[in-house]
Image (cartoon, grey):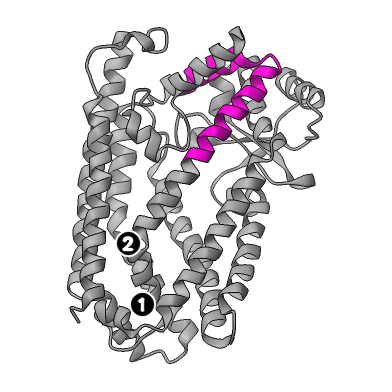
Amino acid sequence: MRNIYFYIIIVLFILNFFWDQFLSYLNRTQMSPNLPKELEGIYDSTEYARQQAYQKENSRFAMISDGFSFIIVAAIIWYGGAGWLDGMLRMYIDNAILLSVMFFWVFSIFDWILNIPFDWYDTFVIEQKFGFNKTTRRTFALDEVKSIALKLIIEGVIISILVIAFNYIKGYSWIWAWAAISVFTLTLSFFYSEWIVPIFNKQTPLEEGELRSAIEIFAQKTSFSIRNIYVIDGSKRSTKSNAYFTGFGKKKRIVLYDTLINDLNTDEIVAVLAHEIGHYKKKHVIYQIAISISFMGLLLWALTLFLDNPEIAYALGGTTPSFHLAAVGFSLIYSPFSEVFNFAANYISRKNEYAADNFAASHGMGEALIEGLKKISSKALSNLTPHHFVVFWRHSHPTLLQRMRILHTEKTN
């Protein structure tokens, strides 16, 4: 039914798409074949030309894939595809929980199938062309199957919790849903390295030697208790480097990509980890989790305003109000508010990145951190000159050049 909610959904969906394209366009305006003076020492002219070519190819590919997704979703909205699927499933399923789970599973599988060719092209054409890809076709296929299976399991649990809370609990159902989802997501975060990572990668304890000793000495120096230091086989998929910190208490662990160990020297690796330890010491992870959980509670409360509105179901082509149609309508309508929240979250995240850099610098690791970040960025052909507004609005991390300036300023003060 083409009611007011239908037109609100269509307009917001179109505006959201063109907003994303506008931000991508701003980044493209920064591209130039000439090496900026501020990048001298990070890229030489030949490598910079390669970096620009990589960014341009990724930008063109993103335009095509995003445009394809936009057309598909717009068609589903315009022709009432969600309502049609709801009607088809109701012919075979009476249980409200199973109905909603199957509804989202069908869309997830449909989206997965449509995106496989794009994932394949990105991996075996673009990443291969620029020397990053190490993924075999067998690994790619297994990753795709594992990813969709894991998504369906997690999605099934979350949807089941929400339907039970909103359909069967009377009074403050959103609070019960909020509590249950929070416990579930925190549990996944707590055991991420033990439950999720092994599905895709092999993790082995970092062997005794210079690097492990240097990490343990720095950890002891900063009163950071850590014995779980692991190496992950990132090189089986890509030449790009990374490192991360996960878990709390006795479950916390440092994870290094094997590519990072190959690309950086010991001081630079310790400096990168000093930055991660800075996040932990300054409780950034806890604050971010608290903010995310608070926002999730706000979303679940707002969702209740849509659940009893049959006009949402009609706008999506349905004939019977349901949790899943209300959730889809809500997700499309609240997108501008999500954009504003993400902007605020990104602003806080960038401040936290500077603070973690400062922590590393305060322990004498500033220069090593700069050199390590230079190597990681240059080897990955990262875009070091994105448009300043895109950084301001969309980036969760400051640019490398911004971080370098702040670190150099703190060193001279």
| Badge number at residue 325 | 1
Residue in the picture at 59% in, 67% down: 181
The amino acid at mark 1 is: Leu
Residue in the picture at 51% in, 34% down: 350
Query: Measured from the top left, where is residue 157 in percent x and y?
Result: 55, 71
Give the quarter of the image for residue 232: top right
The region drawn magenta spans: 347-376
Task: Give the quarter of the figure containing the N terminus.
Answer: bottom left
Q: Are marks 1 and 2 in contact (CB under 8 Å)?
A: no
Query: Measured from the top left, where is residue 90 in percent x and y?
Result: 35, 89
Front-lying residue, 11 or 364: 11
Q: Is residue 175 left or right of residue 74?
A: right
Where does label 2 land, which residue?
Answer: 111
The amino acid at mark 2 is: Asp
Task: Give the quarter of the figure containing the C terminus.
Answer: top right
| Badge number at residue 383 | none
Per the picture, the main secondary structure of the magenta-coloured stretch is helix
How many marks the image carries: the answer is: 2
Query: Measured from the top left, where is residue 273 in percent x and y?
Result: 65, 27
Give the quarter of the image for residue 408: top right
